[in-house]
Image (cartoon, rainbow, N blue to C red):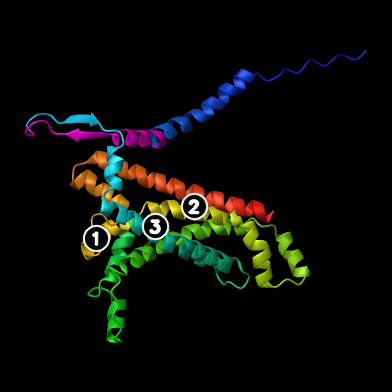
Amino acid sequence: MTALAPPRRRPRTRDRSAAKWVLLLPFVVMFALFFVAPIVYAVVQSMFTTRSSGLGLGRPETAFVFLDNYARALGDAAFLDSVGRLVVFAAIEVPLMVLTALGLALLLDSGKARFPRFFRVLYFAPYGVPGVIATLLWGFLYIPATSPVLQGLGELGIAVDPLASGNVLFAIANIALWGFAGYNMVILMAALDAIPSELYEAARVDGASTWSTTWHIKLPLVRPSVILVTVFTIIGTLQLFVEPLVLQPLTTAISSTYTPNLAAYNQAFAQGNPNLAAAMAVLVALLGFIFSFGFLRLVNRKGSRAW
């Protein structure tokens, strides 16, 4: 007679659930402290206001005003102009960023590219430069007195002023493109590298040209990464703050309310009204939420139709 094998012990469900929570706890705590808490605090602060009592000799009083700060922000013509200016900037920057990053990724992924690793690092290098330093560097190139490029164009009779009122938005877009195109290119390069080589071999056997391979294989398979890059660019565009703040002393075309974030910064630290600044910040966050999820819903609807 053969001895019966001992029964297998079933894993304890409680132990597994406890282990999951132990692993998730650091993330949950950090997420709550550094993501959820600031949002809740900003929303709460946006519903209060600070009023001075009497002749301003007593302690200021905090009063609950509900949505009055939002009404003040939406009734401020300068803030609305900054929102419109930001939408125009996004319409310029988002397609330019995505097309540039995608073009660089496809160029380096092609078999005709020479020294692809060197140029990959070269294109990514501007991302390592802090935004303030990058804006200062480009600021010197935008001033004719310190820019060798503008001085050379001036000797040829070509007068260019990147910091003029009609050009400063494009000048800021150029700084953002220079700093983040390489980062987005790396994301798309990773997606291109993940495409199985068997698909390229099958296309080569079928006699597909380079353009056909790019159009029918590469672009459809990197579509999720292109969508991700677009969402990142939309969110980053709505956070526009550093570039206009640094360029502001160099030109009169950038006011203290040039972008919504600048307007909120001005209200918080120059006007001493952090509650109105919190309302402006919440409105910008809502705008980013609407743009991002609106874009995702649009592309997902088109994707489902394609299937």
Q: Are marks 3 and 2 in contact (CB under 8 Å)?
A: no
Q: Secondary structure at mark 1?
A: helix
Give the image quarter of residue 180. Answer: bottom left
Mark 2 or mark 1: name the one nearer the start of the chain: 2
Q: Nearer the viewer, mark 3 or mark 2?
A: 3
Front residue (pair 265, 307): 307
Q: Is any atom of residue 8 visible in this view?
A: yes
Q: Nearer the viewer, mark 1 or mark 3?
A: 3
Q: Which residue is mark 2?
A: 231
Q: For mark 2, does the 10 Å Cα neighbourhood hold few (<14), some (14 to 19), or many (20 or more) residues?
A: some
Q: Residue furthest right?
A: 1
Residue type, mark 3 in image? Val
At 57% from the left and 69% from the top, the residue drawn is 107
> Could you tell me which residue is drawn at 55 percent across and 49 percent down?
297
The single residue placed furthest to the bottom in the displayed view is 156
Task: Compare marks 3 and 2 and give the one earlier in the sequence.
Answer: 3
The residues tagged by marks 2 and 1 sit, at their Cα atoms, a distance apart of 28 Å
Q: Give the quadrant of the N terminus.
A: top right
The spot of residue 228 in percent (x, y) is 53, 52
Q: Nearer the viewer, residue 228 or 76?
A: 76
* Residue 87 - label: 3
Q: Nearer the viewer, residue 45 or 6?
A: 45
Seen in the picture, residue 91 relative to 271 is either above or below; the reply is below
Nearest the eye: 226 or 115: 226
